């Protein structure tokens, strides 16, 4: 949640969801952002490095049109994970 809050402060009008992805050598944090705002992922990551502890800095930030929801109306983490994996 700490990551999501920090990203929301940097990108106005955004929905943010963070997932762990196991890449064989350990888990990495990756962020998916749904927004109409234009932003540069590298700039956001740079700013996050000054605001968050090193261990919670995400590996990537991906922009999507909307966050996928499950049948209960909550963000579907598996589908977000798939979106990130397809974008990397």
Image: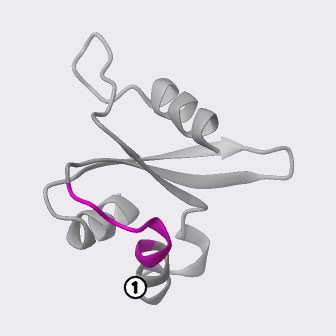
Circle 1 packing at 10 Å, graded few (<14), some (14-19), many (20+), is few
The quarter holding residue 70 reads top left
The magenta span reads 37-44
- Side of 49 relative to 1 (left or right): right
Magenta span contains residue 66? no
Q: Is residue 87 above or below residue 35?
A: above
Near-viewer residue (80 or 62): 62
Q: Is residue 75 above or below residue 28?
A: above
Q: Residue at x 61, y 61 (%)?
A: 59
- In this view, the residue farthest toward the bottom is 50
Q: Is residue 44 above or below residue 47?
A: above
Q: Position of residue 76 (x, y in %)?
A: 39, 25
Q: Position of residue 49 (x, y in %)?
A: 50, 83
Q: Position of residue 61 (x, y in %)?
A: 48, 57
Which corner quadrant holds the C terminus?
top right
Residue carrying label 1: 51
Q: Is residue 22 above or below residue 56?
A: above
The quarter holding residue 67 reads top left
Judging from the image, what secondary structure is the residue with disc 1 in?
A: helix
Q: Residue at x 21, y 71 (%)?
A: 9
Q: Residue at x 21, y 57 (%)?
A: 37
Magenta span contains residue 38? yes
Which corner quadrant holds the N terminus?
bottom left
């Amino acid at each position: 949640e700490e990551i999501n809050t920090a990203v929301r402060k940097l990108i106005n009008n955004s929905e943010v969801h963070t997932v762990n992805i196991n890449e064989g050598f350990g888990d990495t944090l990756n962020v998916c952002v749904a927004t109409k705002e234009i932003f540069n992922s590298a700039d956001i990551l740079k700013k996050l490095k000054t605001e968050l502890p090193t261990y919670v800095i995400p590996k990537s930030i991906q922009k999507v049109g909307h966050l996928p929801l499950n049948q209960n109306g909550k963000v579907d983490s598996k589908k977000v994970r798939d979106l990130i994996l397809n974008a990397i």
